[in-house]
Image: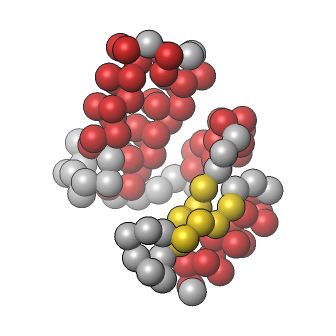
Amino acid sequence: MRDEVLLTKFIDYLGCGRIERASARPDGVNFAISKFHDIKEKIIPFFLSYPLHGVKYWDYCDFVKVANIMEDKGHFTSEGLKKINYLKSGMNNQRENI
């Protein structure tokens, strides 16, 4: 419940996104965005101004790399998809700070 309240405020502040029920946890929620423009123009700049700390910072850096690949239409190529999958494989895995 607390996460949903926080994410609702995040949606109100940024003017984008929606809350989806998490499949992994019955009481969990996820913040989802479907417009690439919102990611590039709202989400990435927000976390550039208010940086994450620790492991989540490195996940954010990889997220930005994926967004840049997509912006350059790299996700339409096999090489671009390989890069995206590689970056994705390292995210949310409690990796050590580099």
Residue at the outermost bottom position:
1
- In the displayed structure, 31 sits above or below 21; it is above
Q: Residue at x 38, y 47 (%)?
A: 59
Q: Residue at x 53, y 65 (%)?
A: 30
* Residue 17 screen position, x and y as percent: 69, 56
Q: How many marks can you see?
A: 0
Q: Residue at x 56, y 85 (%)?
A: 2
Q: Is residue 47 left or right of residue 58?
A: right
- In the displayed structure, 10 sits above or below 4; it is above
Please, which colouring scheme is shown?
A: secondary structure
Residue at the outermost left position:
96
Q: Residue at x 70, y 72 (%)?
A: 8
* Residue 9 screen position, x and y as percent: 71, 72
Residue 57 visible in the current orientation = yes
* Quarter in which the N terminus is drawn: bottom right
- In the displayed structure, 96 sits above or below 86; it is below
* Quarter in which the C terminus is drawn: top left
Q: Is residue 93 left or right of residue 27?
A: left
**Front in this rendered view, residue 85 or 49:** 85
Q: Is residue 88 left or right of residue 39?
A: left
Q: Is residue 34 left or right of residue 57?
A: right
* Residue 14 screen position, x and y as percent: 75, 56
* Residue 31 screen position, x and y as percent: 58, 61
Residue 49 visible in the current orientation = no
**Front in this rendered view, residue 58 or 31:** 31
Quadrant hosting residue 83? top left
